[in-house]
Image: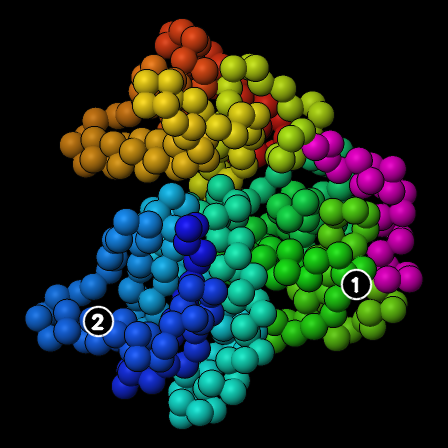
Amino acid sequence: GKTMASLIAFTDGGVVLFSRGKNVEKLPSSHRQLFYGINKFVQQKNAKLCTTVTENTRMCWKTFEPGILFVYAYANENVDDKGAEWFADLLFHSITFILGEGTFEQDATTIRLSLKSCFGFIDHLLEEQSKFMGSSLGFVDAVLIDEQEKCQSALNDYCIDCVTKFGMLMVDGHCALATVPMWNLSQFELSLVCSYVRALGNCDAFDGPVYLPFESPDAPFRLVSLNLAAGVNLVVLCDLTHSLSHIINTIMPRYWSPLLDTIVKLPPRVGRTVYPSTFDIHEDVWLMFAVERGYNRAFTYITQWDIVDRVAGVRLDTKKVARTWYNTAMDTYANLSKRDHKVHDTYADNDHHKAFARITPNIHVHMITAPTIAAYALGNICDDVIAQLQQHGFG
């Protein structure tokens, strides 16, 4: 059957702090203890256990201070080793995000009791770990929207009135806009805020404390999320200057009521992806994945979810193909850069699709296309993609 993501956490002495995920929760405690024993055995051989692989499952082993061991299991087809290590870090930081620093400096019994308040969020992270293309590669998932300048101006002014520099607008679970200080948070912190808002579901308004693991691990921010329209959330990290009712009834309408007609249309949906009506690229581009390095954000455009390999008689997941291509292109770029080779464009060709990548200091664009597109045309298509991304403030 399909392997669901799971997580087991141990103390340095081998005490199981918690187990999350349907697969491991069914295991007897003696079986869970085996994972700790395997790690200790490898350490005694003066080696480090990073990843293990079975037929259907990969497991990531990561130790955090003060000696907390995370064993994270996930389906082979969902995330590669680099993405898994990033996600294990995200899971660890999610505990600080909820409880603040110092949680693991107590005795095991106290830690166990404290961690129970994190289980709902950890379960949510495990459940959505492969749903978002950017997150699986260590980026914040972004989306492009129409009327970007108007909405950005409203967001900046709204944050000033809320007495904060941290604010963002989320559309369908993706970060559409953010203030510059919000973008400048670590990708872990911004990803955790986005995931936390997604975990709230269809909540009209939320007001509660969260900690930023790097920016403020010992003093909580107040996370205020307001649902402006279906799938559109307005989020700030602020202090206690204004009450929730004052933000809802006075500050929010001042800036967002004039934009209501725009907000309810953010953005139109095509299949299972979102992008603005003005974003239009070649019809034979099945998936486009763009990364803006400055903000560690990624935008995914996808129109074909499966690729048919007629030779092997199987269907390939387009996102999995794109993830593999992304890692191949970036590894090639890194290796050639070490030899002082300048790499700009690279592509691969096979019977059932073409893959193309353009890597610049500011923006990386990766495309999976129909095999019928001529190789010489890929560069021109990429030029058009980058121009449209920049028109929408990306890159």
Q: Tell me the residue that label 1 is attached to.
A: 205
- In the displayed structure image, the side of residue 10 where residue 221 appears, left or right: right
Main secondary structure type of the part rendered in magenta: helix
Any part of residue 327 in sight? yes
Kindly identify the residue that appears in the image at 35 percent across and 70 percent down. 70
Q: CA distance from mark 1 to mark 2?
A: 44 Å
Q: Pick whichever, 92 or 313, lies toward us.
A: 313
Residue 382 in the image, given as x and y percentages of width and height: 47, 19
Residue 100 in the image, given as x and y percentages of width and height: 52, 78
Label 2 secondary element: helix
Residue 120 in magenta?
no
Residue 35 found in image quarter: bottom left
Q: Pick whichever, 47 or 73, lies toward us.
A: 73
Sequence-first tag of 1 and 2: 2
The stretch in magenta equals 248-269
Q: Residues within 10 Å of mark 1 (few under 14, many from 20)?
A: some
- In the image, residue 229 sits, relative to residue 329, either above or below, namely below
- In the image, residue 98 sits, relative to residue 360, either above or below, namely below
Mark identifier at residue 39: 2
Residue 343 in the image, given as x and y percentages of width and height: 28, 25
